Image (tube, rainbow, N blue to C red):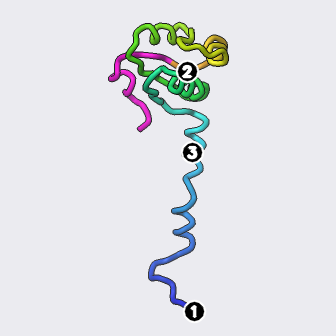
Amino acid sequence: MAAEPTGWSPVRVQKRIQPPRQSLLAWYHYGVRITVVGAGYVGLSNAALLAGRHDVTLLEIAPVKVEAINQRRCPIIDEKLQDCLAHDELRLQATNDSAKAYRGSAR
């Protein structure tokens, strides 16, 4: 039988492999601040999905899109996304100020 390496313990290996459950649950339940760049089809869809549980800031350079999103109007043609923005309770705000968008966001 091969000798085990010095300092090796199954308990230490198990602790390294398993994620810290308490911090993952806290992230899931309490949310984080997330910045999404771009209000196109992909960016706006992801921002709306994440904003159901997290504080999401959408960074967009077009002032027309920023104003529309902040008024809960969809700047792109997508029926489900229009319905989501108009009727769902989302924690979503749009801005064109990058310093404001990245302040306090998850890294």
Image-quadrant location for residue 11: bottom right
The picture quadrant where one finds residue 95 is top left
Give the amino acid type for the residue marked by disc 1 in the picture: Met
The answer to whether 104 is drawn above or below residue 93 in the figure is below
Q: Residue furthest left?
A: 99
Residue 92's x, y, as percent?
53, 19
* Residue 100: x %, y % from top left: 36, 21
Q: Nearer the viewer, mark 1 or mark 3?
A: 1
The residue positioned 59% from the left and 13% from the top of the image is 77
Q: CA distance from mark 1 to mark 3?
A: 39 Å
- Look at label 3 and name its amino acid: Leu
Q: Which mark is residue 24?
A: 3
Magenta-highlighted residues: 93-107
Check residue 1 in the rendering and tell me which mark sits there, or answer none: 1
Which structural element holds mark 2?
Answer: loop
Left or right of residue 62, residue 70 in this image: right
Q: Nearest the camera: 94 or 81?
A: 81
Instruction: Determine if residue 69 is in view.
Output: yes
Task: Determine which residue is flagged by label 2.
Answer: 91
Quadrant (top left, top right, bottom left, bottom right) of the C terminus:
top left
